[in-house]
């Protein structure tokens, strides 16, 4: 069905891909894995006609194709769900699904046909939360992901590419996606599947291709490898321990922050205590209010009710001044000034609040293991993991008392992930109170000293370290189970 | 002078250009005569300069040179009257002085019960609409100061059958208006200045000609006449430059010429608004100010007197804004008016400078407003 | 700063070409005259730079320059004793207009293109409403010294350049650029985005006040003094490689853009391409310069701050 | 009460029409108070007055919706008026040729704008400013005053009426309806919104974004060309300053945003623009009736534009937060 051979690509003279071979058969799920910046997305964008390869060929159904524009790839039967959201918020769901391929009748757009087809696809996906006429901006993140999927399905595709489709999905939505992929498989469609969550890879894939630093490492049947082997291929070394050891009770210090019956438009009656030296995990389904909690504590979407001591910040500045930091879930949109050098990004918070100590930027970059620690490089040229380290450095310059992490390892490869985990533990050990939000339960459980579970903007329960995934899910989804 | 309509301030980039060399055409001489040159008009205007005007001697705005009277009995009607005025714009000091003068003239006549004026803001299209709109207002007479000659002709032609029309300042390409009021004109203006320089500057002297911008009829005629005079003279025109009426640009251009040519013997200008900026360029360069042609603007006259300059100021008198009101009333009373009302166009010289230079008037006031004896003077014109 | 190198090469080339065509340019007096002429635009470009790099536009500076000169003339009215009080007032007016532009843009969230377009109409309308259609009064000799005597203009320009560079190196400058690059990230890092933007507009207003003082001093009162300066200032900044939309570009390069523009006018005049075709040449060069500078970069959206 | 007001302004298009009606009412009252009357004639005047700006603004709407903008329309209008009038040279037999040539020139300018923006990747502000300067240079070089002559037949376009309705207004309405239809019912319209909403998203979804932007610019310039033809018929000749004197560049942009179209692109439409243009025209007409000083008019206009956009921004802002 698909055969890519000897693909090479450079950006601004930097080699991003070289000599990549990749093939996929009809009805096969082929996973592509690799560290951040390994070139997975770039390879898929070449297939989708977004980028043109410097060398190599793309063959689809036996004929060699070269796409100058995404529309040509679409016509050749390639559909793609991009890593980043790719929707127009001001347009309706149907408009988005059929963008660029609007059905016409006598030369005019046939809106009725468009909406009907969209409704049919939504039905197929068991999605009844919204309709074809709803504006995308009114949908939740998960619903938007569904629109992305519908959009890919609406193309009569022979090859469907999914670039981290689950990054924004909660567990039960992931299940739905699984079912869908199996159905595509059944129809003889080749699915290329990219994810950092290796469990998904093993759940779904027939074969796995590993990329590293733009080069092809191996293509193996999924059944023939173990997770450890795969990780080794990806990072080129064995990762000894997945998570750093937890804090022992003696290391947990004074109370840094207390919430009592705190609430706002999205949260209600939150009781929480954060202490120096510990990492508190926050679990919950999509939309359960985890990010809202972090933003409320930080002052970005302040609490309007209840107590928060020692201070209840009414704005980001007050939060920062009170020693609270937030590592946002979307680092490109909310965390970094991409065109500025590493140094300026690292100093941004310090400068914003007129903090004095900024001599140690280079030390700090070494501490967060930025590699290579070049201060003058513009952040946009760094890999995702390195970008996240810069975000960390940005907060460490002002030595926050409380640091909130919202999905700190989303879209970060295993190697960088381990480094970030180590760092979080080190920061906590130095006396900072940490709140960590993660949708990846193994990570959350592995890192947290205790876990708070949210449901519908309220605290559903507290769990101790080492709780099982089942225990967490039971609390997080209790309502649904009851209903 | 009556600056041409310059566009909205939104025009992209009129650069304050600097120019150390004349344009090629200019350095070769004064160049070809422009399409705007009409020999017959030229001859007529130059002749008019020496003719004596008919009318009250102390009221030049009521005088007319060589009038061909037309009968207006058919427009006769009883007062009080409603006069209407379509104004091209009030976007420069000349028009501002004129407009003030006209309003004061209206105030002098009790038989005018209503005076409706619309300002076209320098837009041809708006003036066309304004003229149409005024026709529906029950005006007894319509005064028009056209924004441009050719393009307002259809609108004026349309108005003529409806109401007696009086046109002044710029003309239109139809003789349907009852009367067209204007000073002698641009040829006379241009010639006055050029002849002065030819008289004062020794043969071979270098002349710099400064123009506002090309393509505006009232300005083209001025330069045409000056060119005719210079071509016949022994003077050497070292450059013809466009200033956009911008003082800073004028000053830069003149400074560059001084730097390049060392000595300049005379400066001719088609409008005096930037004359002082040009004079300052000489002052700043530390060289004597040569013979200068300016206009009747207060700042120039003041500079002339204070600096004891060799200068002349041809005029395009703002008192012409009084005449249309007077003409309208005459027409409505059935009195004869000249078909072509040529107002006298005095020039200010060393001898009569004292009589025109009024103390305490704003720098941008025009001396020939004919407004000194009006009740609102000087306050309404910004004087003290 | 790397992005800025082309503009300095182009500028150097133009200056050499001017010197070749007009040796007077190399004499101190000739060069001083050039600097004096560039000063107002260069100062405006510096002010406009702050606004552009923060992701906004300021279209009101041309009208503001006119307002400054007309207000000065009417208030001073030839009286030397009024010089200093009025100079102080002009600075206040500049800052105030910038403040209002900034507040309307940040607080009321009107795109700055529209805010400053409105300000442009309001300012020029209001000042002539006040003076009745044309400037009145006169400037004092003391006022005119700054624009008339080259040394003053050059000294003021030097101060502006140094101050601009220092500001950009200070926390203010860095946070301003960060706000222009990614407003949300800056906000979530504790940057008072609105405040730095308002401050940028105030700097632009201040630059218009200073430019007005120089231009009024140079050639006296005129209604056209500020005409189309906003477009020239923006063009200069963009020529300097500063990206419309914010977050990228250096202030020295923006000022160099102003020098380049002025040098270009000078050169065109020297070669007799004055008047008519000058505009055409200017248009082509501006497009070409930006095209060459921007080809490697992805296309940018028009509207700087998409909230 | 406030709830209803909020609901009213929640949609910019509705808001601009509400403002239009309010202005008409207040204007009528003020004029009546001043001792005048607001007649049918004045309404006709308003249509006549708004036609040229209206047509340009419709074109500008397309450019802005596509995430671009066009600062070259004013000079293009002047150029087109001259090209048309010179080609006609007073002969009615030349009208068709002249219209074709004039629109051809317009399309070419639009093409250049579009290509410079998309292929050379020059910011629309700079690209169209540069093209404006080039046209200005050409105008200054070739013309030094009004030129050409429009035959009487062609002047009908600018002067005659069908009943009380000026032909110019009908032309404007036709352009507005045409572009409205294009935006609402065709693939091109959908893509204009998509490209203006987010170019990258549109491109990755398979839209040939460059072509869309270029086409939007060609259409924008064609609208300017039609306005140029209309003005030539009004003036009876071509004039090198007719476009800039009218301030059609910035005023058309102002009318578009007044009509609630987002300057950022992707949001808004023709209906709002028509309301915006009419609002400006009614203001103009009322000021004319009251004989208000033109400088005061500028002040009011500036305030109206900023306040209107501030109101729209409040509404979108509330949603976003
Ligand atoms: N348009 C571009 N211009 C320059 N460099 C780019 C561009 N797109 C990607 N790169 C670089 O190419 C490399 C590969 O990026 P790519 O996005 O393909 O990685 P990935 O494997 O998908 O990583 P991730 O897991 O973070 O999504 C990275 O170093 C990235 O910075
Ligand atoms: N029914 C809904 N209507 C509108 N918005 C909703 C709804 N459900 C969820 N949301 C979105 O979800 C958010 C609530 O929670 P929040 O984003 O904090 O969830 P979360 O658990 O952190 O999810 P994520 O995993 O995306 O970070 C709201 O800000 C809102 O944007
Ligand atoms: Mg990727
Ligand atoms: Mg979240």
Image (spheres, rainbow, N blue to C red):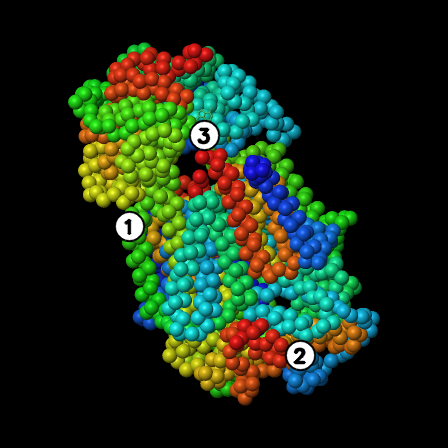
Mark 3 burial class by Cα count in 10 Å: few <14, some 14-19, many 20+ = many
Residue D7 vertical position relative to residue D53 in the rendered view, above or below:
above
Q: What is the secondary structure assignment of the residue under circle 3?
A: loop
User: Which quadrant of the figure contains the C terminus of chain D?
Assistant: top left
Can marks 1 and 3 be said to lie on one chain? no
Q: Position of residue A315 (x, y in %)?
A: 36, 38
**In-front residue for pair C209/D134:** C209
Q: Residue at x 58, y 57 (%)?
A: D297
Question: Would residue B341 be seen by someone viewing this image from the given angle?
Answer: yes
Q: Circles 1 and 3: CB distance less than 8 Å?
A: no
The residue at which mark 1 appears reads as: C169
**In-front residue for pair C238/C176:** C176
Q: Position of residue B89 (x, y in %)?
A: 61, 64
The residue at which mark 3 appears reads as: A86
Q: Circles 1 and 2: CB distance less than 8 Å?
A: no
The residue at which mark 2 appears reads as: B61
- Frontmost of labels 1 and 3 is 1
Can marks 1 and 2 be said to lie on one chain? no
Q: Chain of mark 2?
A: B
């Amino acid at each position: 069905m698909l055969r890519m051979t000897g693909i090479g690509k450079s950006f601004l003279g930097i080699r991003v891909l070289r000599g990549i071979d990749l093939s996929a058969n009809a009805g096969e799920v082929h996973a592509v894995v690799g560290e951040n910046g390994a070139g997975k997305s770039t390879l898929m964008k070449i297939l989708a006609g977004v980028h043109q390869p410097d060398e190599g060929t793309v063959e689809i159904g036996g004929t060699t194709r070269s796409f100058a524009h995404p529309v040509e790839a679409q016509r050749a039967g390639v559909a793609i769900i991009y890593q980043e959201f790719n929707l127009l918020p001001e347009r309706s769901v149907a408009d988005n699904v059929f963008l660029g391929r609007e059905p016409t009748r006598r030369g005019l757009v046939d809106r009725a046909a468009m909406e009907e087809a969209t409704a049919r696809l939504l039905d197929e996906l068991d999605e009844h939360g919204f309709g074809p006429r709803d504006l995308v901006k009114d949908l939740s993140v998960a619903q938007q992901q569904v629109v992305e999927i519908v959009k890919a399905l609406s193309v009569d595709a022979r090859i469907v590419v999914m670039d981290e489709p689950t990054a924004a999905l909660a567990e039960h939505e992931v299940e739905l996606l699984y079912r869908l992929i199996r159905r595509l498989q059944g129809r003889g469609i080749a699915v290329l599947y990219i994810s950092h969550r290796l469990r998904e890879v093993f759940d779904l894939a027939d074969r796995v291709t590993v990329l590293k630093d733009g080069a092809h490492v191996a293509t193996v049947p999924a059944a023939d490898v173990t997770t450890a082997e795969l990780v080794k291929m990806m990072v080129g070394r064995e990762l000894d321990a997945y998570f750093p050891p937890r804090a022992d009770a003696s290391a947990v210090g004074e109370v840094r922050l207390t919430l009592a019956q705190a609430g706002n438009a999205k949260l209600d009656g939150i009781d929480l205590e954060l202490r120096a030296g510990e990492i508190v995990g926050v679990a919950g389904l999509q939309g359960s209010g985890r990010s809202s909690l972090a933003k409320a504590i930080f002052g970005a979407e302040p609490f309007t009710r209840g107590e928060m001591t020692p201070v209840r910040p009414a704005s980001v500045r007050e939060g920062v001044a009170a020693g609270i930091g937030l590592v946002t879930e979307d680092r490109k949109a909310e965390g970094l000034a991409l065109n500025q050098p590493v140094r300026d990004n690292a100093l941004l918070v310090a400068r914003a609040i007129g903090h004095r100590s900024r001599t140690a930027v280079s030390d700090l970059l070494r501490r967060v293991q930025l590699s290579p620690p070049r201060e003058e490089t513009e952040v946009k040229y760094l890999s995702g993991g390195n970008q996240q380290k810069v975000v960390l450095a940005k907060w460490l310059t002002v030595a926050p008392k409380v640091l909130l992490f919202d999905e700190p390892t989303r879209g970060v490869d295993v190697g960088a992930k381990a480094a970030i985990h180590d760092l979080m533990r080190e920061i906590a050990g130095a006396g900072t109170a940490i709140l960590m939000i993660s949708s990846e339960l193994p990570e959350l459980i592995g890192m947290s000293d205790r876990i708070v579970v949210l449901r519908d903007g309220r605290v559903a329960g507290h769990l101790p370290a080492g709780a099982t995934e089942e225990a967490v899910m039971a609390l997080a989804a209790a309502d649904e189970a009851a209903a | 002078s009556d600056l041409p309509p310059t566009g909205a301030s939104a025009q992209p980039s009129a650069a304050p250009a600097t120019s150390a060399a004349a344009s090629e055409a200019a350095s070769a001489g004064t160049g070809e005569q422009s399409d705007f040159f009409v020999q017959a008009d030229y001859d007529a205007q130059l002749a008019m300069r020496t003719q004596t005007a008919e009318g009250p001697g102390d009221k030049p705005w009521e005088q007319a040179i060589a009038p061909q009277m037309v009968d207006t009995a058919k427009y006769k009607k009883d007062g009080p009257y409603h006069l209407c005025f379509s104004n091209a714009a009030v976007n420069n000091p000349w028009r501002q002085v004129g407009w003030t003068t006209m309003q004061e003239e209206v105030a002098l006549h009790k038989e005018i019960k209503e005076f409706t004026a619309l300002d076209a803001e320098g837009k041809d299209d708006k003036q066309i609409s304004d003229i149409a709109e005024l026709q529906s207002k029950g005006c007894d007479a319509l005064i028009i100061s056209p924004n441009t000659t050719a393009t307002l002709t259809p609108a004026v032609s349309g108005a003529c059958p409806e109401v007696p029309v009086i046109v002044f300042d710029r003309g239109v390409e139809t003789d349907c208006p009852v009367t067209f009021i204007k000073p002698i004109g641009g040829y006379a203006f241009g010639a006055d200045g050029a002849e002065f320089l030819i008289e004062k500057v020794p043969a071979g002297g270098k002349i710099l000609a400064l123009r506002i911008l090309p393509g505006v009829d009232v300005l083209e005629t001025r330069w045409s006449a000056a060119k005719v005079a210079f071509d016949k003279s022994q003077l050497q025109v070292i450059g013809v430059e466009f200033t956009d009426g911008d003082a800073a640009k004028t000053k830069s251009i003149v400074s560059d010429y001084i730097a390049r040519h060392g000595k300049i013997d005379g400066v001719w200008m088609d409008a005096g608004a930037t004359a002082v900026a040009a004079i300052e360029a000489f002052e700043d360069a530390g060289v004597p100010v040569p013979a200068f042609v300016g206009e009747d603007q207060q700042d120039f006259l003041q500079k002339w007197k204070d600096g004891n300059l060799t200068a002349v100021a041809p005029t395009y008198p703002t008192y012409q804004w009084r005449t249309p009101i007077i003409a309208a009333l005459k027409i409505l009373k059935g009195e004869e008016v000249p078909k072509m009302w040529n107002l006298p166009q005095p020039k200010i010289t060393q001898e009569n400078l004292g009589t025109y230079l009024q103390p305490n008037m704003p720098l941008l006031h025009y001396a020939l407003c004919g407004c000194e004896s009006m009740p609102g003077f000087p306050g309404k014109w910004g004087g003290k | 700063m790397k992005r800025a190198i082309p503009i300095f090469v182009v500028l150097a080339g133009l200056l050499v070409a001017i010197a070749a065509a007009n040796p007077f340019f190399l004499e101190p007096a000739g060069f001083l005259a050039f600097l004096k002429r560039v000063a107002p635009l260069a100062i405006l470009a510096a002010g406009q730079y702050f606004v552009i790099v923060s992701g906004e536009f300021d279209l009101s500076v041309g009208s503001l320059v006119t307002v400054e000169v007309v207000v000065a003339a009417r208030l001073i009215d030839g009286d030397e004793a009024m010089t200093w009080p009025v100079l102080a007032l002009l600075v206040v007016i500049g800052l105030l207009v910038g403040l209002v532009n900034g507040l309307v843009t940040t607080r009321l969230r009107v795109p700055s293109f529209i805010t400053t377009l409105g300000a442009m109409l309001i300012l020029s309308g209001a000042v002539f409403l006040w003076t009745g259609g044309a400037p009145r009064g006169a400037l004092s000799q003391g006022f005119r010294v700054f624009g008339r005597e080259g040394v003053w203009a050059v000294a003021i320009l030097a101060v502006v350049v140094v101050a601009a560079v220092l500001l950009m190196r200070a926390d203010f400058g860095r946070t301003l650029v960060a706000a222009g690059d990614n407003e949300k990230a800056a906000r979530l890092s504790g940057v008072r985005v609105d405040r730095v933007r308002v401050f940028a507009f105030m700097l632009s207003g201040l630059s218009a006040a200073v430019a007005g003082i120089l231009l009024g001093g140079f050639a006296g009162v005129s209604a056209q003094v500020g005409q189309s300066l906003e477009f020239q200032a923006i063009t200069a900044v963009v020529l300097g490689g500063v990206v419309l939309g914010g977050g990228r570009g250096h202030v020295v390069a923006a000022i160099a853009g102003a020098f380049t523009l002025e040098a270009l006018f000078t050169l065109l005049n020297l070669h007799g391409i004055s008047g008519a075709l000058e505009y055409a040449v200017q248009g082509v060069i501006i497009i070409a310069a930006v095209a060459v500078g921007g080809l490697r970069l992805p296309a940018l959206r028009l509207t700087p701050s998409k909230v | 009460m406030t709830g209803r007001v909020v609901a009213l302004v929640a949609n910019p298009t509705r808001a601009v029409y509400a403002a239009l009606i309010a202005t008409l009412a207040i204007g009528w009252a003020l004029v009546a108070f001043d001792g005048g009357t607001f007649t049918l004639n004045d309404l006709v005047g308003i249509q006549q007055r708004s036609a040229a700006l209206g047509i340009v603004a419709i074109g500008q709407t397309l450019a802005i919706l596509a995430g671009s903008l066009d600062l070259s329309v004013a000079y293009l209008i002047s150029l087109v008026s001259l090209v048309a009038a010179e080609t006609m040279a007073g002969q009615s037999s030349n009208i068709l040729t002249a219209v074709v040539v004039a629109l051809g020139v317009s399309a070419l300018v639009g093409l250049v704008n579009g290509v410079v923006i998309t292929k050379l990747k020059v910011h629309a502000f700079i690209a169209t400013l540069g093209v404006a300067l080039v046209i200005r240079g050409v105008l200054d070089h070739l013309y030094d005053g009004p030129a050409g002559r429009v035959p009487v037949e062609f002047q009908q376009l600018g002067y005659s009426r069908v009943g009380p309705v000026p032909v110019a207004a009908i032309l404007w309405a036709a352009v507005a309806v045409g572009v409205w239809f294009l935006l609402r019912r065709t693939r091109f319209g959908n893509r204009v919104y998509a490209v203006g909403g987010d170019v990258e998203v549109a491109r990755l979804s398979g839209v040939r974004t460059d072509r869309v932007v270029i086409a939007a610019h060609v259409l924008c310039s064609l609208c300017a060309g039609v306005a140029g033809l209309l003005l030539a018929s009004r003036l009876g000749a071509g004039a090198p300053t007719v476009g800039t004197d009218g301030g059609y560049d910035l005023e058309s942009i102002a009318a578009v945003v007044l009509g609630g179209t987002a300057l950022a692109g992707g949001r808004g439409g023709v209906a709002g623009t028509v309301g915006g243009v009419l609002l400006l025209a009614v203001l103009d007409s009322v000021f004319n009736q009251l004989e208000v000083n033109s400088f005061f008019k500028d002040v009011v206009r500036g305030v109206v534009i900023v306040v209107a956009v501030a109101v729209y921004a409040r509404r979108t802002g509330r949603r976003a937060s």
